[in-house]
Amino acid sequence: MALLTERAKENMSRDDLDNFFLNESAVAYEIEHGKAVKRGRWEFPVLLIVANARDHRSRKRFSSIVIVNTGHNEWAVDKLP
């Protein structure tokens, strides 16, 4: 939670955040090279490999993560996959 911006926290409920971090069954992930969206804001493509507990199959989930400079050389997550 400490690494999330206020904007990221506002866009997800506490239950959504808990489900993302505790119940997401990502067994692997891949983060590609990011690109500057604008000054102090970078977006990185993310591929999550998610396991399905019911049929024991995995599926690919494509998304992105956005990191922003919050000042004083500190960075925070502004958008989760």
Image (tube, rainbow, N blue to C red):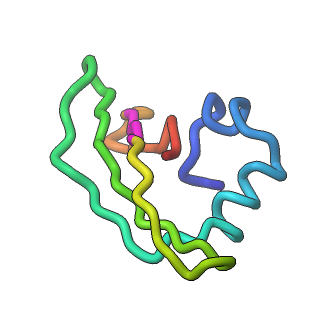
User: What is the chief secondary structure element of the magenta stretch?
Assistant: strand
Image side of residue 43 versus residue 68, left or right? left
Q: Residue at x 40, y 37 (%)?
A: 66
Q: Residue at x 50, y 36 (%)?
A: 78
Image side of residue 34 versus residue 46, left or right? left
Is 56 magenta? The answer is: no
Residue 58 coordinates in the image, percent (x, y): 47, 71
Image side of residue 56 versus residue 65, left or right? right
| Residue segment shown in magenta | 64-68
Residue 8 coordinates in the image, percent (x, y): 61, 35
* Quarter occupied by the N terminus: bottom right
Q: Residue furthest front?
A: 55
Q: Residue furthest top?
A: 38
Residue 38 coordinates in the image, percent (x, y): 27, 17
Determine whether 14 is above or below 26 in the image: above
Determine whether 49 is above or below 70 in the image: below
Residue 26 coordinates in the image, percent (x, y): 50, 70
Determine whether 29 is above or below 55 in the image: above
Say how many tags the image has. Answer: 0
Q: Residue at x 29, y 43 (%)?
A: 45
* 81 and 5: which is toward the camera: 81
